[in-house]
Image (cartoon, grey):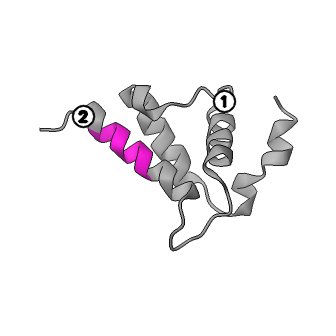
Amino acid sequence: MTSDLEQARQRAQEAFDALWQPGERRRTLSRDKALYWLAIALGVKPGLINIERANETACRQIERTCIGAHGPAAFNLKSERRRL
C-alpha cells in the first residue's frame, strides 16, 4: 500500500513533469528552467526544490502551483530574475 506522502510526491512529480516534458501542450522549457520557475513561484531560492524530500504540504503546494501554470506569461523567467 502506498502512503499518503508517496502519493503526494507522485502527484507533485507528475504535475511538475507536465511543465517541461513534451506532450499535448508542448513547452519550450528545459527541466532546469522549469525548476527555476517553480522555485520563484513558490518563493524559495532556486536549487532548493526537491520533490523526493518534500513533505505532504509542500507536495500539495508544488502540485497546485504546477497545475495552475498556463500560458507563456507563467514562464516569464527574465522578469522574475530581477526580483532575486
| Residue at point 24%, 34% (across, down) | 4
Location of mark 2 (residue):
4
At label 1, which amino acid type do we have?
Gly
Quarter of the rendering occupied by the N terminus: top left
Question: Which is nearer the N-term, disc 1 or disc 2?
Answer: 2
Q: Tell me if 32 is positioned left or right of 56 in this view.
A: right
Identify the residue shown where x is 64% and y is 29%: 47
Callout 2: SS: helix
User: Judging from the image, what secondary structure is the residue with disc 1 in?
Assistant: loop
Q: Marks 1/2: CA distance?
A: 25 Å
Residue nearest the viewer, comparing 55 with 57: 55
- What's drawn in magenta, residue-wise? 7-14
Image location of residue 75, percent across then percent down: 72, 53
User: Who's the residue at 49% across and 53% down the image?
Assistant: 17
Circle number at residue 43: 1
Q: Quadrant of the C terminus?
A: top right
